[in-house]
Amino acid sequence: MEIPRYRGPLPPVRRGRAARRLEAKQAIEEVGDGARLHVATGCAPPTHLLEALAAQRDRFTRLDVVLPYTLEPLAFFDGVGDPFFLTALHPAGALRGFIDHPGMEVLPTSVTQWDRAVSAGGPRPVDVCLVQVTPRGPEGRHSLGVNGGETAQVVRRAPVVIAQVNPRMPYTFGATELEADEIDILVDGEEALLEHPPASPGELELRIADTAAGEIEDGAIIQFGIGALPETILHKLRHHRDLGVHGGMIGDPIVDLVEAGAVTGASNRLDPGLLVSAGALGSQRLFDWMDRNERVLIAPAAYSHHPMVLGRHARFTSINSAIEVALDGSTNSEVVAGRTVSGPGGQPDFAMGANYSEGGRSLIALPSTAARGKFSRIVRALPAGAPSTLPRYLADRVITEHGVARLKSLPLAVRAGRLRAIADPAFADALA
């Protein structure tokens, strides 16, 4: 099979960088006080570089650190606010504990907006990008491995790129590939990648997943979000045929579907036979499977998430979850009881892409109640101050353990009736 090459949009290549080999301590000494750093996170934060950064905190009066989705606490977290000030795209995972901290701010942007936000002319332009890369492959390039969508564009725009070279990083093809002279400083640092264990669904999740799987057609191009429900739905697709993948991430369930013959990419109009993703979130098994896998194409968010790209697929189907859904179909996926627990991420991008796609579907799957039945997750209206992560004009299919509410293009009164039908019966009077 031919090695997949990414031919979509990217910032202009910045060649002729020095690619100097330094120790981590020396590399961080090149970071000036007051700089803004973009740190690749997910399953592969550059831990050696971040430990060196934390060790030198006393020489900084302020450093601004921009972070995408962060799984585990980073080495400098005990210095948040002095001197490290954080800007988060996904205020979830390890960042959730800093939501109310004066040393952290949240940019409520979708993934496709992130690149502009941290580029020159945006509100938080970065000076330095810290990443992990593979050693040079047979073709002479390094790869960003599992970090693509939120890094591939930034790493090409940043004035300075410092890369930790980790032989355990899987080599992926696509926008993740970098020539050596696109990197300013290389630092050797071998370490295991962070693993995101597969979900362990309960009976409730399995019931919802059974229903949701029936809303996904053979030949659909699927995208799935982070969490137990989207992953559990994927496990129910083993008997589907000719599914494709184009979205924010690849996880362990995708490996299972490929091995079961359910995911072939045959229906992919844009990249036939390929699985297109912004990156990966999963276990060592996933990383081993991805290494130099010629069926996997890692793309930047401008391609993996952009609604106009997704809309060119037939039957693009997004699979996500939410905190609550209002009777008009609007969805909140970011705030619980007035407290921010996540960002919009790729949900708005994917829902809009499904809206543009011929035969596309946007699935929101969630239990009908929260807090062991104390609260309904189908609500009369989103609470004051809660964001409409998906506005009502993007409402499509909402799924609970009580069934499916198909809402697209329906009047508000009809939507309300259908959502009441899939709410927990204990809240029937409150939703009347």
Image (cartoon, grey):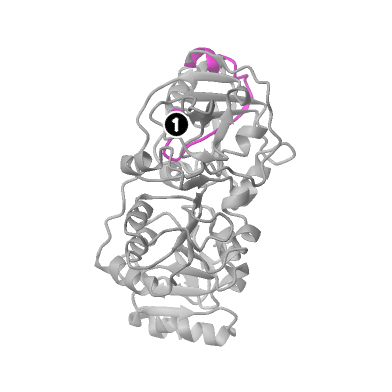
Residue 402 magenta: no
Residue at 47% from the left image edge and 23% from the top image edge: 49
Q: Which residues are magenta?
A: 24-46
In the image, is residue 325 above or below residue 146?
A: below
In the rendered image, residue 237, in percent from the top left (x then y), is placed at 35, 65
In the rendered image, residue 163, in percent from the top left (x then y), is placed at 52, 25
Residue at 35% from the left image edge and 51% from the top image edge: 255
Residue 25 magenta: yes
Camera-side residue of 416 and 199 = 199
| Residue 336 visible to the viewer | no
Task: Return the residue at label 1.
Answer: 77
- The three-letter amino acid code for the residue at tag 1 is Phe
In the rendered image, residue 143, in percent from the top left (x then y), is placed at 51, 32
In the image, is residue 89 above or below residue 311?
A: above
Figure quadrant of residue 183: top right
Residue extending farthest front = 1
In the rendered image, residue 110, in percent from the top left (x then y), is placed at 59, 53
